[in-house]
Amino acid sequence: MGSQGSSNLFGWSKRVLWVDLSRGEFREWRYPGEMARMFIGGRGFAAKILWDFLEPGADPLGPRNLFIAAVGPLTGLPGPNTGKLVVAAKSPLTGGYGDGNIGSWAAVQMRAAGWDAIVVEGVSEKPVVLVVEDDRAWLEPAEDLWGLDAFRAYDRLVERYGRDAGILLIGPAGENLVRYATVVSMKGRAGGRPGIGAVMGSKRLKAIVVRGSGKPELFDPDAVMKYAVEAIREIKTSPNYGFWMRQGTMFTIEWAQEASVLPAYNFREAVFEGYEGISGSYMERIEVDLRSCPLCVMACGHVIDDSEGRRVELDYENVAMLGSNLGISRLEEVGLLNRLADVYGLDTISLGGTLGYALEAAERGKLELDAGWGETKKIARLIEDITFRRGVGDLLAEGVARLSQRVGETWYAMHVKGLEVSAYDCRAAPGMALAYATSPIGAHHKDAWMIGWEVQHGRTEYNREKVRKLIWMQRFRGGLFETAVACRFPVVETGLGLEHYVRLFQAATGLSYSLDDIFTVADRVYALIRMIWVREHGGWSIEKDMPPERWFRDPLTKGPLKGAKLDRDRFIDMLRMYYEERGWAPNGVPRPDTLRSLGLDGAAELAEKYTIPR
Ligand code: PTT
């Protein structure tokens, strides 16, 4: 991997702020430059820190878990869309590696304050806010904020610390340790699907507030500015830009209906009779505002008034999982459930997956529940019960994997490794099923949105071409964007070329990494994350990567793909191909020689114990 030959590292501050809440101690960790070269930042730093410092077997909701917020060398640059950061920890939902990507002023402010990551361990005796201002960090009491919803608490924090403060916080769901509580920012941004908000809650950390007055030292600031302007120009002149600005991710509802991948009634079907009422076209007619993350030039936050007349920002995943998946066909009503998730700090996808399962289990007479498909008001009450862990809500707060174990019927619990699946049915999309199966955090679409490509390329086929396509997507989406930390939408929605990011990276850091070099970093990060899972489980087996049983068992009964379901044997063949392409053993453990070739010697030692022969 090339570099400018200089030992100087530009683009990173080379500092991590380490906070121990049990002891009330703060320390600056000047990490070795090798860490930046090998892991870049964001998810790469989170994986490296968890591998090196997380005690195996630590309780995810106990003092030894580490909450991490990390930026990367592209974060906070003039553009495009760089106001993002990664939050990560051992997940209370899955017990494995968990992370999420959140748009926030905190990302920009961390760069200005000169911290590449903030790591929080221990548990505070009382609720606190961690305040970081340039080099200084301290704790402030937060008893007055504890119990407040994420929007009210945000307003209070803005009053106290100013409009320009970067704020990450949790709502009551995080405080009450709901296993899919998220971190919230800016009244409408949420990240950390696998319960990273609950990890903050377990530490009694209500919020992190960051302010900085500096700026990152870049290798060639003029070139960064020039390349950023060029990229932004290209985004804005892309043929898809106008439509994107009108609908954002909401266009996906109509697309998913047409492609028969829209989840309906807990993924019983992949078409929904009421899809028009929750569609992007309908949204355009009632939209009242448009919001974005900081430094964004292609805002995706379309805002409507919900059925109670309050503002809410919509996205496809939220609307599909809390709309069609629960049998609700009025966008304003879905908006109400979406807003509750935002103010309480619950992940909409896991919430929709858990509620969908509960409604189906109730219909089958297996769970007592005062709600049915499409009953928005009753479902809204259930969301409150989940947040405050009241009655049956306490069980639903555990997520669909644990809930289904308790109910005793697991085959229609829609999750992989404990993380509820995002909003794409896979009965006629084995490549997307493989994306869920191999995502480093459980069934999330962010690392590889295979579905868009797959519906146009032999969608029911199982082949090596799909496996290679998937790995390529994981390399740039889960690798480049999650380590350099910027929004991927310019590439995936307007077709901006990846070369823009490579030259921005080079100009920012002075490292002459090619796209292939960055992909090697991505492979290293993937292998290390897999080894975190292996270490936590004391080994691995192919069953742990399998998609939900329903997709193999229940064919679709409606729509143009009636009769479609996944084929187990062919799926397993494809999963084995995936391991092979990555240099992992047939049981899903990275081979020691693969790990050594990626410079992960410590992980290779552990892999010796668990790998199986070719
Ligand atoms: C992301 C997941 C998604 S993916 C959505 S909608 W999407 C849901 N959003 C939620 C929400 O809102 N409120 C809530 N209470 N829960 C929610 N859960 C769901 O979380 C988001 C955008 C979007 S909108 C997407 S795809 C892209 N995601 C990116 C990513 O992951 N990485 C990256 N480098 N760039 C990305 N750009 C886009 O950002 P998670 P956000 Mg989100 C209200 O966090 O855990 O990764 O799960 O972060 O700031 O809201 O931006 O159709």
Image (cartoon, rainbow, N blue to C red):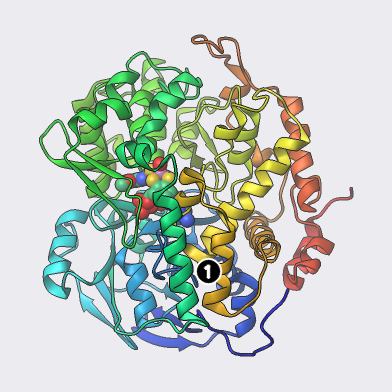
Q: Please tell me whether residue 550 is drawn above or below residue 22 in the rendered image.
A: above
- Percent x, y for residue 213? 29, 84
Assess mark 1: CB under 8 A from ligand 1? no
Residue reaching furthest to the right: 614
Give the residue type at disc 1: Leu
99 on left or right of 181: right
* Side (left or right) of 602 relative to 378: right
Residue occupying the point 38% across, 32% down: 251
Query: Does the rendering let one see residue 66?
Result: no
Q: Quadrant of residue 537?
A: bottom right
Measuring 81% from the left and 57% from the top, which residue is drawn there?
Answer: 591
Q: Can residue 140 be seen in the rendering of this structure?
A: yes
**Where, quadrant-wise, is the N terminus in this rendering?**
bottom right
Image quarter for residue 483?
bottom right
Image position, residue 74 (x, y; %):
48, 69
Q: Can you identify the residue that label 1 sits on?
A: 504
For the residue labelled by badge 1, is the local secondary structure a helix, a strand or a loop? helix
Vertical relation: 240 (above or below) 610? above
On the image, the x and y values in percent for residue 496 come to 51, 51
Q: Position of residue 490 (x, y in %)?
A: 46, 51
Nearer to me, 271 or 494? 494
How many discs mark residues in the rendered view?
1
Q: Along the line of sight, which residue is nearer the eye, 508 or 7? A: 508
58 to 459, vertically: above or below: below
Viewer-closest of 269 and 199 = 269
Q: Is residue 571 or residue 428 the one in the foreground?
A: 428
For label 1, count other residues whose C-alpha is less than 10 Å away and answer few (under 14), some (14-19) or many (20+). many
In the rendered structure, the answer to whether residue 331 lies left or right of residue 366 reads left
Left or right: residue 606 versus residue 120 is right
